[in-house]
Amino acid sequence: MKPPVRARNFWQSLSFALAGLRHALRSQRNLRIHVTVAAAVVIAGLALRINRSEWAIVAALIALVIALELLNTAIEALVDLASPAPHPLAKVAKDTAAAATLAAALGSAAAGLIIFLPRIWDLFS
């Protein structure tokens, strides 16, 4: 088996990262859901004219959730490689990585409600 290719420069590193993102988008349903929700949040932010500070929060939380979902995918792949047979510790690692993404998604949803609900309320009052 050939050793993995090391990036020779920034552009090659970027290419490898984008290949990982493409793989995750193709293979991970939850990542596709997070990206879809993120797009809806961006559209809502534009429609409701959230301010710069709110955009900073929204952007950071979108990046956090997507980054954790990508990290969860990497952890699952490593666990599957290291422990192809079911093992209680493999389950703990996978479940805990998934829980990290869930925690970030729930926190992001709470922040989204704090940012968006008052503006939506104002539309109907």
Image (cartoon, helix red, strand yellow):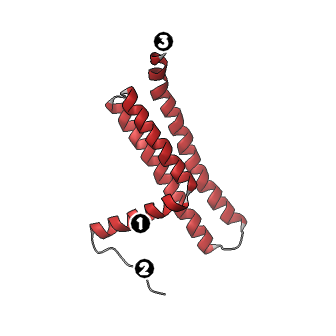
Q: Answer above or below: position of 47 versus 20.
A: above
- Which comes before the other along the chain, label 2 or label 1? 2
Numbered mark located on residue 4 in the image: 2
Residue type at mark 3: give it: Ser
Residue farthest along the top direction in this orientation: 125
Q: How many marks?
A: 3
**Distance of mark 2 from mark 1, alpha carbons?**
14 Å
Left or right of 99 in this view: 69: left
Badge 3 marks a residue whose secondary structure is loop
Closer to us: 108 or 37: 37
| Residue 7, percent from left and from top | 33, 73
Is there CB contact under 8 Å for labels 3 and 2? no
Instruction: Identify the element where label 2 is drawn.
Output: loop
Cα–Cα span, label 3 and label 2: 59 Å
Q: Residue at x 38, y 79 (%)?
A: 5
Mark 1 crowd level (few <14, some 14–19, many ≥20, 10 Å Cα): few
Q: Is residue 40 left or right of residue 82?
A: left
Compared with residue 120, is residue 39 higher up or lower down, i.e. above or below? below
> Mark 1 and mark 3: span between their CA atoms?
47 Å
Secondary structure under the numbered disc 1 in the rendered image: helix
User: Closer to the camera, 88 or 124?
Assistant: 124
Query: In the drawing, what numbered circle is on residue 19?
Result: 1
| Residue in the picture at 39% in, 27% down | 48
Q: Is residue 92 left or right of residue 5?
A: right
For the point 45% across and 86% down, which residue is it? 2
Asked if 48 appears above or below 100 in the picture, the reply is above
Residue 15 location in percent, x, y?
35, 67
The three-letter code of the residue at mark 2 reads Pro
Circle number at residue 125:
3
Where's residue 39, x and y in %? 44, 42
3 vs 2, front mark:
3
